[in-house]
């Protein structure tokens, strides 16, 4: 497979939830970069490329989840579930990607 990533990735399994066809469903962020995430979606429902994805990342040490909003750039079936790539454009408390990258 031809490598198309613009930024290096960090491997990390991080539990999260996403808003899917059945409401909030489990997922795992498997990789993260400066502008994107690789996510394993624990759903049998197909998610369409180009969909806007809402994630809540659950950190045990934090009282509130971090909220991420992004565009699904690719998706493929992996066993009973799906794995996809999200380009995020909103994270946290109203911060845009540009504001986060400047800090």
Image: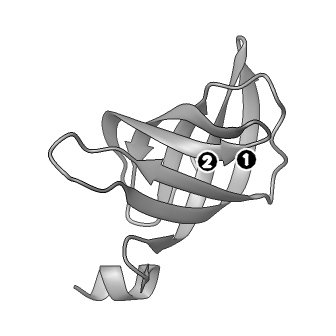
Q: Residue 33, relative to residue 20: is it above or below? A: below
Q: What residue sits 70% from the left and 26% below the top?
A: 43
Residue drawn where x is 57% and y is 65% of the image: 69
Residue 7 visible: no
Q: Are marks 1 and 2 in contact (CB under 8 Å)?
A: yes
Quadrant assignment for the C terminus:
bottom left
Which one is earlier in the sequence, the residue at label 1 or at label 2? 1
Tell me the tag on residue 85: 2
Residue 66, located in which quarter of the rendered image?
bottom left
- Pick whichever, 8 or 75, lies toward us: 75
Q: Of the numbered discs in the image, which one, if any, rests on residue 58?
A: none
Q: Is residue 43 visible?
A: yes
Occupied quadrant, residue 59: top left
Measuring 53% from the left and 33% from the top, which residue is drawn there? 27
Q: Is residue 54 above or below residue 94?
A: above
Q: Quadrant of the N terminus?
A: top right
Helix, strand or loop at disc 2? strand
Residue depicted at x 32% and y 80%: 100
Question: Which residue has dot 1 on it?
Answer: 74
Q: Position of residue 14 (x, y in %)?
A: 35, 36
Q: Residues within 10 Å of mark 1 (few under 14, many from 20)?
A: some
Quick check: 87 left or right of 45?
A: left
Choose between 5 and 90: the one closer to the eye: 90
Give percent across and percent down for residue 22.
76, 36
From the viewer's perspective, is 92 left or right of 83?
Answer: left
The percent position of residue 24, horizontal first and vertical second, equals: 62, 41
Q: Nearer the viewer, residue 6 or 77?
A: 77
| Coloring applied to the structure | one colour
Query: Which residue is farthest left?
Result: 61
Residue sitting at the far top:
79
Cα gap from disc 1 to disc 2, whole angstroms: 5 Å
């Amino acid at each position: 497979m031809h490598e198309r990533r613009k930024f290096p990735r960090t491997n990390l399994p991080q539990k999260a939830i996403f808003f899917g066809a059945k409401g909030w469903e489990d997922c795992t962020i498997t990789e993260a970069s400066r502008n994107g995430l690789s996510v394993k979606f624990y759903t049998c429902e197909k998610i369409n490329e180009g969909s806007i994805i809402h994630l809540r990342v659950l950190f045990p040490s934090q009282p509130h989840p971090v909220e991420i909003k992004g565009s699904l750039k690719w998706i493929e079936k992996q066993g009973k579930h799906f794995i996809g790539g999200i380009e995020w454009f909103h994270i946290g408390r109203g911060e845009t990607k540009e504001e986060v990258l400047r800090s």
